[in-house]
Amino acid sequence: MRLLYSLLIFWPLSIINIVLTFMSYKLFGKLQGTEAASRVATNWGYLQYHLALSQLKIKGVENIPKEGGVIITSNHRSYFDIFTICAAMPRDVRWVVKNTLMHYPILGFVLRNIRAVGLDRGNPRDAVKALMQTAKELQSGDVIAMFPEGTRSTTEEMLPFKSGAFALALKAGVPVVPVAIEGSEKVLAAKKLIMNCCKQVNITFLEPIDPKQFGKDRQLMSDEISKRILTHINRGC
């Protein structure tokens, strides 16, 4: 039954949802970064939850600064983490992704048009250049989301955070909001296509962190943010 629902209903309707959302986002192209664009992304995320017949519980939205540049950093357990953050975020958000995704025929087109930031891990010089440009955009008020683990964890353990991801925070000097997502892997496990219905996912936005307190030590910052997310998850809050 799960296989039939996934192949015949969930994924076909998900593709339609992506296409319609992208068309809507393009309609609001001149409004990127505004409340209108945020509503489009929020509706997209919630519709995916409806398709999965699952619920999303949101906490800590008050910890997201209402204006100015912000970096959202989250643990990563499932493809559903993207839908989760989009549904929960009250502001329009851009994504930091692997540069290889930008070259996929359809996905790459979408990512480029929603101003995703592609980082080439095999080319440090280009990656630094992209981060420096993104830092300027953050200082102008953009919201950037990233998964410091670098990939989805396939176990119960959270993967080590890559400290390089926090070079952007130190350069831009904007608040970083740690995010703890729990249960998304129960809806759609990493590297799986068969989803599970009737699950609950929890997302909690923790208190923002000022990168200035870490000086230039991105490893120290990485360790602190990882610790806060892991502590929250282990408490089962």
Image: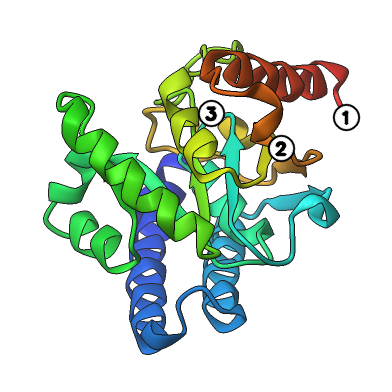
Specify the amino acid type for callout 3.
Arg
Residue at x 66% of width, y 33% of height: 212
Residue highlighted by disc 1: 237
* Alpha-carbon span between mark 2 and mark 1: 23 Å
Residue at x 44% of width, y 26% of height: 152
Residue at x 51% of width, y 45% of height: 172
> Where on the picture, by quarter, is residue 125?
top left
Q: Position of residue 114 (x, y in %)?
A: 35, 66
Mark earlier in primary sequence (2, 1): 2
Residue highlighted by disc 2: 210
Specify the amino acid type for callout 2.
Asp
Q: Nearer the viewer, mark 2 or mark 1?
A: 2
**Position of residue 142 in the picture relative to residue 215 (left or right):** left
Mark earlier in primary sequence (3, 1): 3
Q: Nearer the viewer, mark 2 or mark 3?
A: 2
Specify the amino acid type for callout 1.
Cys
The label on residue 77 is 3
User: For this rendering, which residue is in front, 19 or 129?
Assistant: 129
* Alpha-carbon span between mark 3 and mark 1: 17 Å
Disc 3, disc 1: CB below 8 Å? no
> Where on the picture, by quarter, is residue 219?
top right
